Image (spheres, rainbow, N blue to C red):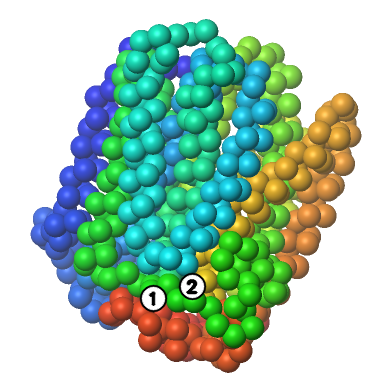
Amino acid sequence: MPSEDTNVTPVLVGLSLIVLVAWCIMSRRVNPLLRAVGLDGCLGSDITDTEGGAAGKCIATLYGKLPTSHIPQVGMLSGILFCIIGVYWLLRSLKDTVFATTVGIEYQPRAKMVSLCVVFGLLFVYNRMIDKFEKHVLFYILSITYGSIFLAIAFYLHLPGVGLSNTEPDPTRLIGWVSYCAIESFGSIFVSLFWSFVNSSVSLEHAKASYGLIIAGAQIGAILGPTMAVMSSAIGVANLYAFGGAVVGMVWVLMRRFVQSYGTGTPRPEASTGKDKGATGLVEGLYLLGKHPYVLGIFMITCLFEVVVTVLDFEMKVIAKQMPEYHDTADFARFMGFFGQATNSVSLFFSLMGTSMVIRRLGLSRTLLLFPIMLMCVLCFVFFMPSLNVFFFALVTVKGLSYALNKPSVEMLYFATSDTVKFKSKSWSDVFGARGAKAMGSLITDSLRSSMTMLLYYGNLASILVNVVLLVIAVAMGRKFNELQATGQIIDGSAGKSAGKEGEDNNMGDIELRALTQAASEEGDDDHDP
């Protein structure tokens, strides 16, 4: 366990390096950096130049046709996600401490229910805002709003008598409730908005090359955020809240720079016409989920694996808690901390070294099958060998690859949908789909928790059945995606609308969405099932 006098120098050095790289990216000094390390010949301004030299071949193998001119774009997107995820994990690591100190830990179950209601209400507001504002403007609004909220919370926590100096918990202290709900809604809505924007801003070919690099930024944030939270005794909880608010405000700066350099990539909001007109507004995302089987399929793929992971996670924690070496609260916290580090490290490594290569080599349809097949193998292992070590390595593998492989694969399915689906239906899938899946997994574990034998046997059996359904849906979704690619159609409620037509509204220059059909013809041989 880290002590209170943990050396902050490595963290400060790491943050300084990240700031330096971000400055180089934003000031378009990538080429001088490449020349400095001898890689200027590896990547050319043209796609076909990525094969030059040994280092160039290595980069081309890992990331495919990613020209130098697109590195700043990928770097900015990765930096934005790094800020979002880093702040979320930083404040998520602190929210229970603040809530327990101000309100009382016994009220946490009630806080979870309250936060769900708050997120539900904010999701209606968010869907309404999608109709009124351009998508990049939503980033400005949310970053300024949440940045101001976190800074206000930090100021309040500093106040004597009402802030953290008052260690007497009281359920009437609103600061604890506001902090809890603000952090929960920030992680749910902001991440969904980011991926919706990215999915509508890049072509499929460049997504296959760059999504792994973008997710790597998220994993670095997921590692550094909790690391800073560990030093809260030295830095101060309120100061960390203020730091988080300032970083969220930086998202506005990064997004503004991105829009100035590459455009918005999304059309202006327009009122829906035709037979979908009555479904516009607050519930349009839900309407599209029920109307289009393809959109519902994305929802199912997004959610079903969460049921399995929730069951496996609970089983591992029960087994670990029964072990003598982890019976103490501090020792169990150390075990879970090591588990989190291992998971994020695996995800970071694979997102840098394997995500792009696997998706490009296997094609999206086969990659969609890879995760449920791997999950089935893991479930068979833990079913026949239910030990703590097996559960630990199985969950590290599953969670690590779910972030680095399954997440980008599912996001690419949205390339065959309209912006309305990308922003509205996706928000419902990401926020309530994942939460509902975790609730379903919790129902399974809660009904079996009285007996360890029943939990391991019937819990894993139920997980296997859920994974079979996931595998079947993944097969169908892969085939449907290939079909939509081949015909150039998108899912938006209007028959016969093609990806090429959708791309005409895209002002992203050389990364227009109409490249979807081009990517289909260029990589169709790799992407179709045998």
In which quarter of the view is residue 51 placed? Answer: bottom left
Q: Secondary structure at mark 1?
A: loop
Residue 99 coordinates in the image, percent (x, y): 53, 22
In-front residue for pair 471/218: 218
Q: Amino acid at mark 2?
A: Asp
Q: Nearer the viewer, residue 445 or 172?
A: 172
**Residue 427 vertical position relative to residue 417 in the rendered view, above or below:** above
Circle 2 crowding by C-alpha within 10 Å: few under 14, some 14–19, many from 20:
many
The residue that mark 1 highlights is 267
Q: Left or right: 79 with respect to 313?
A: left
Residue in the image at 70% along x and 74% along y: 291
**Side of 280 where 109 appears, left or right:** right
Q: Nearer the viewer, residue 321 or 283?
A: 283
276 lies above or below 234 = below
Quadrant in which the C terminus is drawn: bottom right
Disc 2 element:
helix
Residue 202 visible? The answer is no
Mark 1 to mark 2 CA distance (whole Å): 8 Å
Cβ atoms at labels 1 and 2 below 8 Å apart: yes
Nearest to N terminus: mark 1 or mark 2:
1
Residue 165: where, in percent of width, then height? 40, 9
Side of 267 relative to 106 (left or right): left
Q: Quadrant of residue 210?
A: bottom left
Q: Is residue 419 visible?
A: yes
Circle 1 packing at 10 Å, graded few (<14), some (14-19), many (20+), is some
- Numbered label attached to residue 231: none
**Which residue shows up at 46% across the image and 64% down it?**
130
Q: Is residue 308 left or right of residue 65?
A: right
Q: How many numbered marks are there?
A: 2
The residue sitting at 66% across, 54% down in the picture is 433
Please tell me the numbered disc located at residue 419.
Answer: 2
